[in-house]
Image: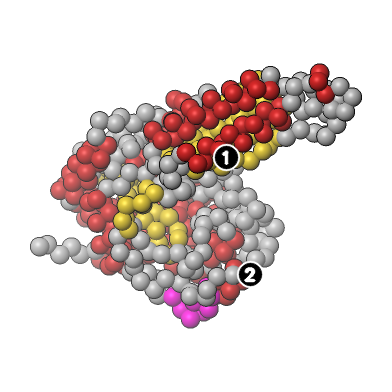
Amino acid sequence: MTVRDYGTIDLSVDRTGEAMESINKEVWMLAEVSNEESESAKVHIRELEAAGFTITSLETSGRPNAFIAEWEQGSDGPRIGFLPEYDALPDLGNSASADQAAAPNGKSAGHGCGHNLLGAACTGAAIALKFTMEMEGLPGLVRVYGCAAEETTGAKVYMARDGYFDDIDVCIAWHSGSKASTGYVRSAAVNHIVLEFHGKTAHAGANPWEGRSALDALELFTHGINLMREHVPTTARMHYVIQSGGGAPNIVPDYTRLFMYLRDIDRAGVDALTTWSRSLAEGAAMGTQTRADFKVTFGMYDMMANTPLVENCQKHLEAIGVPQWTDVEQDFAREIQRNFGIPDTGLATSVEPITPPSTMGGSSDVGDVSWCTPTVWFNYPSVPLGIGMHTWPVTACGGMSIGSKAVDGAAKVMARMAYDLMTDADLRAAARADFEERRGDIAYVSPLESVS
């Protein structure tokens, strides 16, 4: 059995450290939310261009702040893609402190999902791979997809629709978390639904019979959705917010609006939920003599795993291990946990075994990529144990040394995987065969085709 030497690729990551830290810190401070992350995208582009990449597409697939950068050496070599994200979340701005405190620059948004770290490591790993390929004379193409707006209407879905992943051998991604792990956890497929009811106003006290209440229709619909919960698979999720429910109690509302996510284990499950929900909307409108406007505005696929890539990822996770945390960092983590009201167990100190098959409740546009080409992702510790994403501690840790160490470790894991894929035709072939077997005869049909 050949023992590979990863010294060059590890050194290339170290050489990229300054660029990764610049991306990490600048994007953390910018904290731009989905579809507004123009300056954050420019930070990535600046570092990629400085490293010799060419920006081949801006506003890719018509999406604000999305881009594609490439570097190629030789011809007909392997083609590896990286998936950096860089959008922040509203209301999760925080200082790099162990308590919930305002960001020093007054930003109300913050990187409560760690996309400053995610993006820095992905772009850094791509640059490190390029450096190593130059030193070793390896033919191949390195492509970086600037994945804007992951938290809302992710650019990857539009890129997948337009075929931007069809010519790539493998895509690599990671996500910040509390543990170092990879495996067969699949994200859920999802549809975004906007439902509007249109009725007729009237004086609610004097002559309500002349009105037709859009709020009555909305309440009938939500009642129906909540009754549905008894009769859907346990993998299904239906959650909504009412964005407009009327203006005053003494006016029969002529307009209401609801925003809803429908999730399930796969696209077929989501499509079934969507059909049922549409029927409920039509029934609610009939019962209240109003009009329903039911729109699918966006959708995503579930995440498809890949056994050869998972096993390769696990090998490198175990080799790199988790960061060597200092006592100061562990104390910081434990203070966060106490302030957050969970056991103060600190930061992860070991790599988890491969996670068995399961479905998570959340969704990601990485799922669409995984139905277009073999794709692998993993988690790497950047927050204390027990801390979930979309919380202020994620923002806090992302702005200090815990986050910086996560960037370095995650970049080394990705760069090593990419180096293997660039130099091992058998691994690429095995990943492609697994992909074809899992996908079977189900062709990727963009969920955007269902947008109404």
Does residue 92 lie above or below 272 as drawn?
below
Q: Callout 1 environment at 10 Å: few (<14), some (14 to 19), or many (20+)? A: few
Name the residue rendered at 67%, 65% in the picture: 101
The percent position of residue 31, horizontal first and vertical second, equals 59, 52
Does residue 4 lie above or below 257 as drawn?
below
Q: Is residue 259 visible?
A: no
Q: Callout 2 environment at 10 Å: few (<14), some (14 to 19), or many (20+)? A: some
Quadrant in which the N terminus appears: bottom left
The residue singled out by tag 1 in the image is 226
Give the numbered dot on residue 99. Answer: 2
Name the residue rendered at 43%, 45% in the picture: 235
Name the residue rendered at 36%, 51% in the picture: 358
Frontmost residue, 420 versus 113: 113
The percent position of residue 70, horizontal first and vertical second, equals 36, 42
Does residue 324 lie above or below 49 as drawn?
below
Q: Is residue 309 visible?
A: yes
Which span is picked out in magenta?
325-334
Tell me the SS state at disc 1. helix
Q: Would residue 77 be found to the left or right of residue 370 on screen?
A: left
Q: Are marks 1 and 2 in contact (CB under 8 Å)?
A: no
The percent position of residue 105, horizontal first and vertical second, equals 67, 59
Residue with the most extreme left position:
1
Q: Magenta residues: mostly which secondary structure? A: helix
Tell me the SS state at disc 2. loop
